[in-house]
Amino acid sequence: MGYRVAVIGATGNVGREMLQTLAERDFPCDDVIALASERSAGREVSFGEDEVLKIQDLAKFDFKGVDIALSSPGAKVSAVHSPRAAAAGCVVIDNTSHFRMEHDIPLVVPEVNPEAIAKYKKRGIIANPNCSTIQMVVALKPLHDLAKIKRVVVSTYQSTSGAGKDAMDELFNQTRAIYVNDPVEPHKFTKQIAFNVIPHIDVFMEDGSTKEEWKMVVETKKIMDPDIQVSATCVRVPVFIGHAESINVEFERPITVAQARAALSKAPGVVVVDQREPGGYVTPAECAGEDATYVSRIRKDPTVPNGLSLWVVADNLRKGAALNAVQIAEVLIKDYLKK
């Protein structure tokens, strides 16, 4: 017997990726329901190669009898409908930022803290972390197990798909405009994104950091270890899909490059490509459509007693969102919702 699965926000970048990932991984579904706003109701979305689903109106949908919901409709919508689904007996895996830091809702990356899923029973909701946090902690966890991490300094290079389809369209349209000498007008972003980088993701906070940077700090502490100190600078770059991160890590005790490479090579979800030659590393262009978190440029940091630097790349729509949610669902049905 399979499961009834709802995908909330099925017309968005992440929602479509969730449907594709469920199909690709042969998730045991008897029924898949695609949900979105009233204006999208009646539209069709693909599920796998052959099946087409008709979008239903989220506001009118009754979640009774649905086992699992994968939710990515935006934080404000999720704040209303994820608790409504949970109250009907559905376990919600929520990809928005709304529930992540609530103390009684688990924040999960299956390769890092799968045991936290057990806490879902309190409120029926499991939170999916921020895309930039997910790929970082997947790479850091095997190193933290080897030599405890004290401090992380990370700079991100985040693709436009992290801001939605309109942001990807803006990159495309601005690039075309520049080539034909048309005026370039920012709409989704605060400044021109084509042939530029913007050190601003999400809203600014009182201390001068952005909320995206704050997310990386607090989510890393909740998922991995509250004692880890994190300093983040998050930057939007003119890339369609795939986030990259330059990560500097300081450990409590010595760790060699060889030890780090060996630990990362054995870690679930990690692929090491570190050849120390031109092209011997992974970039966002190569990671798009892939499930792995790629680690390159592993090297010693000579400026601190126990330091390493890494380059980490992943598809933000897959491992950074849809795949992580489906992996949580896979653990959920294996250990907690067996039929």
Image: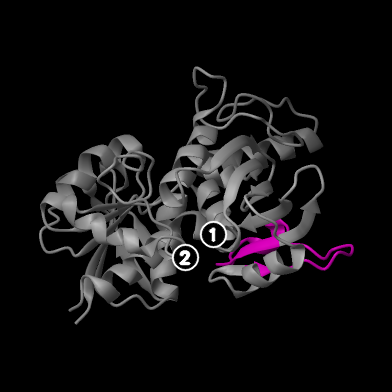
**Distance Cα–Cα, label 1 vs label 2:** 8 Å
The earlier-in-sequence mark between 1 and 2 is: 2
Asked where in the image residue 160 lies, by quadrant, the reply is top right
Task: Check residue 274 for magenta coloring.
Answer: yes
Depicted 323 relative to depicted 194: above or below: below
| Residue at the extreme bottom | 1
Q: Amino acid at mark 1?
A: Lys
Q: Depth-wise, is mark 1 or mark 2 nearer the camera?
A: 1
Task: Tell me where residue 16 sits by quadrant.
Answer: bottom left
Of all residues, the one furthest to the right in this rendering is 278
Decide: few, some or many residues near mark 2? Use Cα within 10 Å; few <14, some 14-19, many ≥20.
Answer: some
Residue 210 higher or lower than 169, as above or below: above
Q: Nearer the viewer, residue 8 or 219?
A: 219
Contact flag, marks 1 and 2 (Cβ < 8 Å): yes
Q: Is residue 317 visible?
A: no
Residue shown at the point (28%, 43%) measured from the top left? 37
Report the amino acid beneath label 2: Glu
In this figure, which residue is indicated by the disc labeled 2? 111
Disc number at residue 141? 1
Q: Residues within 10 Å of mark 1 (few under 14, many from 20)?
A: many
Q: Is residue 289 left or right of residue 8?
A: right
Is 121 situated above or below 234? Answer: below
Q: Where residue 326 appears, x then y in whole percent?
A: 38, 65
Examine the residues drawn in magenta and state their main secondary structure.
loop
